[in-house]
Image (tube, rainbow, N blue to C red):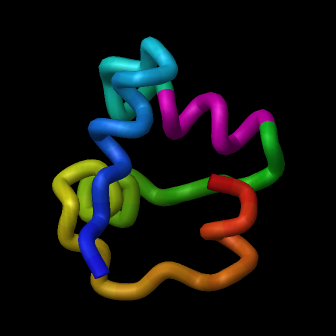
Amino acid sequence: MKWNLRMVAAQRDVWKASELQRMLAEAGLVISAGKMSHLWSGRPLTVRLHDLDII
């Protein structure tokens, strides 16, 4: 599976990982800086289904 979070975020005018991290926190998903870095870089180690549902 290919991970394209940056591309999808850009399509929604979200250009910074910190901005997405804030938006996810508002939706109830608090992500550490390290995990956010992995999600944003395109190489997440794991993604829980619950987290993916919020994203």
Q: Which corner quadrant of the image does residue 42 belong to?
A: bottom left
Judge by depth and name the residue closer to the eye, 41 or 2: 2
Q: Does residue 33 appear left or right of residue 49 in this picture?
A: left
Question: In percent of the image, x 34 and y 60: which residue is there?
Answer: 39
Q: In x, y percent, where is residue 31?
A: 54, 57
Which segment is the magenta one?
20-26
Examine the rendered structure and indicate whether residue 11 appears above or below residue 2: above
Judge by depth and name the residue closer to the eye, 36 or 51: 51
Judge by depth and name the residue closer to the eye, 2 or 53: 2
Examine the rendered structure and indicate whether residue 27 appears above or below residue 4: above
Residue 48 in the magenta stretch? The answer is no
Examine the rendered structure and indicate whether residue 8 appears above or below residue 10: below
- Main SS type for the magenta part? helix
Q: In x, y percent, where is residue 7?
A: 29, 37
Q: Which corner quadrant of the image does residue 34 belong to?
A: bottom left
Question: In percent of the image, x 60 and y 83: which residue is there?
Answer: 48
Question: In percent of the image, x 41 and y 38: which residue is there?
Answer: 8
Residue at the extreme top: 13
Q: In x, y percent, where is residue 45?
A: 29, 84
Q: In x, y percent, where is residue 54?
A: 73, 57
Q: Which corner quadrant of the image does residue 38 belong to?
A: bottom left
Q: Does residue 20 appear left or right of residue 55 in this picture?
A: left
Judge by depth and name the residue closer to the eye, 33 or 43: 43
Question: In percent of the image, x 32 and y 19: which residue is there?
Answer: 15
Examine the rendered structure and indicate whether residue 12 appears above or below residue 40: above
| Quadrant in the picture for the N terminus | bottom left
Residue 23 in the magenta stretch? The answer is yes
- Marks counted in the figure total 0
